[in-house]
Image (cartoon, rainbow, N blue to C red):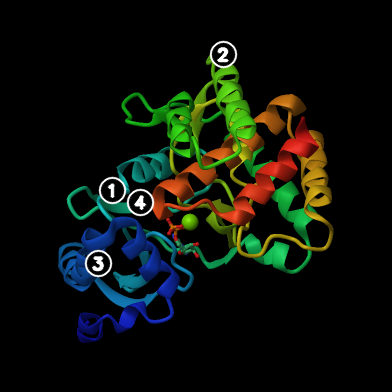
Amino acid sequence: MKKQLNLDYLQGNTYFVDNIKEIYLEIGHQWLLNLPTQVIQLSEKWGFEFTQTMPELSYSFVALVKCQNKPAIIKIAPPQQSLARESLCLSSFHKDSPIIFHFDEKSNAILMEYIYPGEPLKNLVKAGQDEQATKIICGIIRELRFQDIPQQHSFKHLSELANDLSILKGHFDEKLLNKAIYLFQELTVDRSEDIMLHGDLHHDNILSSDHGWKIIDPHGYIGEPTAEVGAMIRNPYNCFPTDKPLRKILERRLSILKAELPYDIERIKAWCYCISVLSVAWTYEGFKKVNASEVALVQALSQVCF
Ligand SMILES: Nc1ncnc2c1ncn2[C@@H]1O[C@H](COP(=O)(O)OP(=O)(O)O)[C@@H](O)[C@H]1O
Ligand SMILES: [Mg+2]
């Protein structure tokens, strides 16, 4: 445990460290400094030993630990990213996801089952098998489509997310933005088929296990099942396929979504578009700049879809 006290355990995770500092400024810096103490306190409370930090962290601290002689995962997030919904979502899924051993609201931490081998679905995309990866995601979306809404929850309805788009006014193409605002409204009128959605179902949040693909890291929203397509269309953002021009890749993915999912293709396209614009807005909110690749994707989607 001593090793943790000098922040060595974050070595190689500069993307995560930079994200936290850039988004949460001084509070984020303090949160990072306090992480070792938090890990030690939680290890005493829950009876685990720190093993190693997971590679490729982005917005939360995730580490492999040993609990009762078995590997487990500890996830701690800054207070602004509450893990309460993630914990409820993971415990409520019918689809395979890690078992939650403990959740602590005050430390905003979860101790959960370690998914082994835990290869992200992204590796298939990296290996040039984007079609196969898209079909696997479709299979998972089909399994998730009858997911009940828990009796007590604090999940946002997708319609509420549309408010986040307004931050883009003056910083993003007005026509493209208005299109997203209009579509968001149209898509959330009928709520008769609403379920609990994962809400961030992309290639990094789908891990291999000896018992098939498991899902991690849900945002947890209420909305129509078709909306689940929104996260995968623009991902994996750091190794998006390049075997064809962007438009062709989007067309290929959309044709697989159409063939594999029991949903109206117009709604699939509209959700892909809306959630991709929302992602531009969230990036702007966090980093105070629009991300050129995200904008290029929205432009290409708009040409392909409408
Ligand atoms: N239960 C788990 N079993 C195995 N690996 C995990 C588990 N949870 C997270 N990871 C690994 O840690 C990474 C980051 O965790 P994640 O919950 O997705 O955090 P973030 O919110 O930062 O995306 C994942 O992409 C995965 O590689
Ligand atoms: Mg993740």
Q: Which residue is mark 2?
A: 190
Q: Earlier in the sequence, mark 3 or mark 4?
A: 3
Is residue 271 placed above or below 28 in the rendered structure? above
Dot 2 amino acid type? Asp
Give the spatial CA distance, label 4 vs label 2: 33 Å
- Which label belongs to residue 80? 1
Of the two numbered discs 3 and 1 in the rendering, the one whose residue sits closer to the viewer: 3
Q: Earlier in the sequence, mark 3 or mark 1?
A: 3
In the rendered image, which quarter contains the C terminus?
A: top right
Q: Which residue occupies 21% across, 59% down? A: 27
Give the spatial CA distance, label 4 vs label 1: 21 Å
Q: Earlier in the sequence, mark 4 or mark 1?
A: 1
Q: Earlier in the sequence, mark 1 or mark 2?
A: 1
Is residue 138 placed above or below 217 in the rendered structure? above
Dot 3 amino acid type? His
- Which label belongs to residue 100? 4
Give the spatial CA distance, label 1 vs label 2: 31 Å
Of the two numbered discs 2 and 3 in the rendering, the one whose residue sits closer to the viewer: 3
Give the spatial CA distance, label 2 vs label 3: 43 Å
Q: Which residue is mark 3?
A: 29
